[in-house]
Amino acid sequence: MPGMTPGIEREMRVTGIALFDRADAGSLGRMLRALPILWCVAASPFLISGWLPTGNLFTWASLLILPLFYLARRQFDALGLMAAMAFILVAYVPAVSLAMIGDTRPTAIALIALPWLALLEVGVRRINAAVVPVQNHGNRFDVLTIAVLLGSAALWTLSLEDPTKGSSIFFTLYAVSLCHLERLARGGTYRLAGLALFAAGVLFYTLFIFDTYGRLLLGALTASPLLIMMMHQRWRPGPVLVGLFVPPLIALTQWVRSSEFSNVGIRDSSIASASQLSVGLIERMDLLVVRWSQFFEQLVFFYLSWIPRALWSDKPLGLGLTIVDELTGRQGVSDSHSLAPGIVGEALWLFGPYMLVGLIISLILFWSVSFVIRIAMRNSSAAMAVHFALIPTLLWGGTASYSARAWAMILPMIIYGWILYFVTARQGAAR
């Protein structure tokens, strides 16, 4: 196991912490959680055939029933929390907000997103069913290392003429720093010091690198250290606490982009862009054809997005850029302009009337990263935290957006984790 001496690895069988919890609260909880899924299944034939819900009765009944899937939970573990946040922020809030100004179509995307996220959770819980390793040997060295890594990222960024160009180095050093926070996760004073350093790192990113674009990535950077703590400290927020946290979070995301707190503000701040693009594609059946060549390009991009374009000039483009190319021919838009297709829009664009195939493939791709983390890092809570924190990015931006951000952080963690493992193993043998 990366970062663990052989003795600690053997001890893991006794001291490991279960990664996942039981989601429902008894038979009533199971019934309430089943109702939204059954509702979505009943509506699926109409959605697949291209029919969109336009009636107010059906729309508001759906918007009242769908949240029960998460409200009926007893508590949220790390995976459940990020799946719930993805549904609320990317699918549910846009559906409610746009329905209030007369656009009921995005409710269809919420009806598709909920069962998709439920299946995503089931698959991850099957693949990563082992315990999270408990590493009790974190010390002042780990706190110092976190400070050096994050400080180096800050100095590198400030040395650039345009600090926003330093994001790739920042992500790499931030990610490997999480490996040391994992080592501190069961400690007391050192744990709090580690969290304080990551809070400072997020603040630095917000002030010097963040330029109002990439709010979900900022959210992932903020969530990752907290998810590690959730796994090791048994922090388990309930639905009420999560519900109280959502309104200020929605207001903050609107203010960052448009400085407007309203339903129109949600529409114009791009929170709802993935839902709007998806329903636009459903209504343009002439655009819905199977694009095999683009699918294979996106498949290659998913696993090899970490290769710099300077080394691979023919590297495929993300689907958001490709869609803009085909819809506009780059007339009236910049060369870098792209759209967030969302996981539903991506399935529609690549597989047309066979959208269901695309949704299943996107699940398999996400599960494959879970498998890599299980094999390469033995369910490292640091890598799993990044993986889970990017679920909203996956639902909003599609597999290309997710893979570009996930591999930029997870691959350095795998490499660094094994280096840390060999160093600590040698130290253990020397003792």
Image: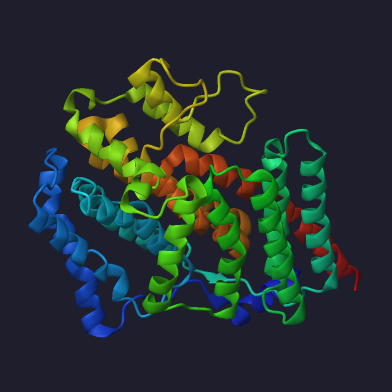
In the displayed structure image, the side of residue 149 where residue 222 appears, left or right: left
The colour scheme used here is: rainbow
Find residue 72 and report its image quarter. bottom left
Quadrant of the rendering where the C terminus is positioned? bottom right
Disc count in the image?
A: 0
The residue shown at (19%, 76%) is 31
283 is higher (above) or lower (below) than 207 = above
x, y percent for residue 319: 42, 30
x, y percent for residue 176: 71, 54
Can residue 22 be seen by looking at this rendering?
Answer: no
Find residue 305 and report its image quarter. top right
6 is higher (above) or lower (below) than 403 = below
1 is higher (above) or lower (below) than 403 = below
- Farthest residue toward the bottom? 26
x, y percent for residue 293: 37, 22
In the displayed structure image, the side of residue 33 where residue 58 appears, left or right: left
The residue shown at (55%, 73%) is 230
x, y percent for residue 342: 36, 42
The residue shown at (55%, 23%) is 315
In the displayed structure image, the side of residue 242 where residue 420 appears, left or right: right
Q: Nearer the viewer, residue 193 or 9?
A: 193
Quadrant of the rendering where the N terminus is positioned? bottom right
Q: Nearer the viewer, residue 378 or 382?
A: 382
Q: Nearer the viewer, residue 57 or 76?
A: 57
Q: Nearer the viewer, residue 334 or 293?
A: 334
Can residue 309 be seen by looking at this rendering?
Answer: yes
